[in-house]
Image (cartoon, helix red, strand yellow):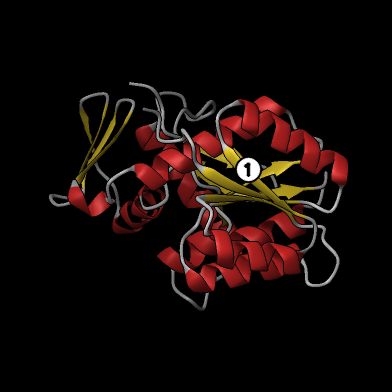
Amino acid sequence: MSPSAGARILVVDDEPAIRRAVRTNLHAHGFDVETAETAAEALERFEHLRPDLIVLDLNLPEPTGLDVIRHVRERGSTPIIVLSVRDAERDKVAALDLGADDYVTKPFGADELLARIRVALRHLARPPRGADSVFRTGDLRVDLERREVTSGGRPVRLTPTEYELLKAFIAHPDRVLTDRMLLQQVWGADYGDESHYLHVYVARLRKKVEDDPQRPRYLITEPGVGYRLLLADE
């Protein structure tokens, strides 16, 4: 059985047409769907239903979608996929920094939203990374215990900072990571605005692990937001 079968999803949006459309589409694909119109209603249903995943509009009246993310993250790791209006990059970055797992930009396609939901639920069903010290995606292999990296079977020599950056991506595969999140994980809590550091090191990392750094297969740029380590097919 697919890990998404029967999963309970809470859809939060103040637009009735969007709530209906998302609910109908998800229900048709076998999901158990509940909806909420406001942040207050969403928090009440979250506490009562404990959904497997939340699809959340940021543009809610007070309290906002960001308040919902903050509340949910205080209580656990329930996956949150944000719905964001076009060009609202600042809001998307804020949501991801607070702990949202992914975002879909409005207007959005139903197939894209379904794909993002399936990815998030697969991660939820997957054993913890600590259970396996070897990370693989496509031709990229990282032995975290031995600190060995290979790409296409060839050894890859990384500097300590490049290796720490790769580890930060591996800890959150297929999740959008903002510049600030990566800077603080790799360089420390005092960093956050030095995006030029990050861009230089991502470029170096791509040259070492990608077959074509100009058309990366693994380290994908999310314009205006950050980066994602894409889980590629074998």
Number of on-image labels? 1
Q: Which structural element holds mark 1?
A: strand
In the rendered view, does 191 fall on the left or right side of 104? Answer: left
Q: Position of residue 21 (x, y in %)?
A: 78, 34
Quadrant assignment for the N terminus = top left
Q: Which residue is rendered at x = 27% and y = 24% of the image?
A: 152
Residue 51, image x and y in percent?
53, 54
Q: Is residue 18 above or below residue 147?
A: above
The image position of residue 71, as x and y in percent, is 60, 72
Residue type, numbered disc 1: Val
Of residue 186 and residue 96, the one placed in the foreground of this image is 96
Q: Residue beneath label 1, please?
A: 33
User: In the picture provided, is 170 more to the left or to the right than 12?
Assistant: left
- The residue located at (40%, 47%) in the rendering is 124
Residue in view at x 46 percent, y 35 percent:
4
Q: Give the image quarter of residue 137.
A: top left
Q: Nearer the viewer, residue 178 or 57?
A: 57
Q: Quadrant of the C terminus?
A: top left
Q: Position of residue 105 (x, y in %)?
A: 74, 41
